[in-house]
Image (spheres, helix red, strand yellow):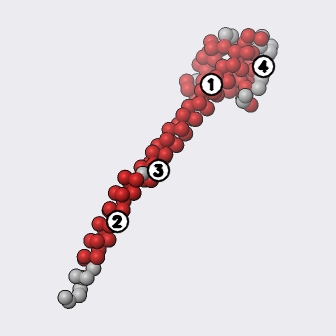
Amino acid sequence: MSIAATTPRNAAQFLVERAERQSGSRMVAYEMVAQTVGTSADWLRKFVNGTGAKEPGWTVGWNLIEHCNRVLCTRVEREIDKERSKAATLKREIDAVNSPVGRVVASAQGAQASSTSAVAGPSLGKDP
């Protein structure tokens, strides 16, 4: 689904970086992600850094990729909802302008403005 989740290591790096932005601490991020995927923070840190950690077992590897995909999907769905809301607002504004009532009001305002200028026009600086 996503480039970030193609391997357990990429997924782990993505999740740790995301958790670090949320918590403000890299070590807290390791704890948060490790707890979520069912491993220790020490193993996760070594795995992400590529220093001495074995490849994860099936369960931990699957949990890393699955959790990463859920996070990404949630973010994409949230963005889609925002865009749909913007589109609905624009559609309502366009519909309001293009509605028959809107056109009648606009033409009435335009007619009123032109009749006011026609009345004011001849009396400006001209003798009757």
Determine the CA span between mark 4 and mark 1: 26 Å
Determine the CA span between mark 4 and mark 3: 58 Å
**Viewed as shown, does residue 57 lie left or right of 110?**
right
Q: Which residue is mark 2?
A: 110
Q: Are marks 4 and 1 in contact (CB under 8 Å)?
A: no
- Which quadrant of the view contains residue 6? top right
The amino acid type, in three-letter code, at marker 1 is: Val
**Viewed as shown, does residue 14 lie left or right of 22?**
right
Q: Are marks 2 and 3 in contact (CB under 8 Å)?
A: no
**Viewed as shown, does residue 36 lie left or right of 97?**
right
* Whole-percent x, y for residue 55 in the image: 80, 15
Which element type, helix, strand or loop, lies under badge 2?
helix
* N-terminal label among 2 and 3: 3
Q: Which residue is mark 1?
A: 71
Q: Nearer the viewer, mark 2 or mark 1?
A: 2
The residue shown at (37%, 52%) is 101
* N-terminal label among 4 and 3: 4
Above or below, 23 relative to 39: below
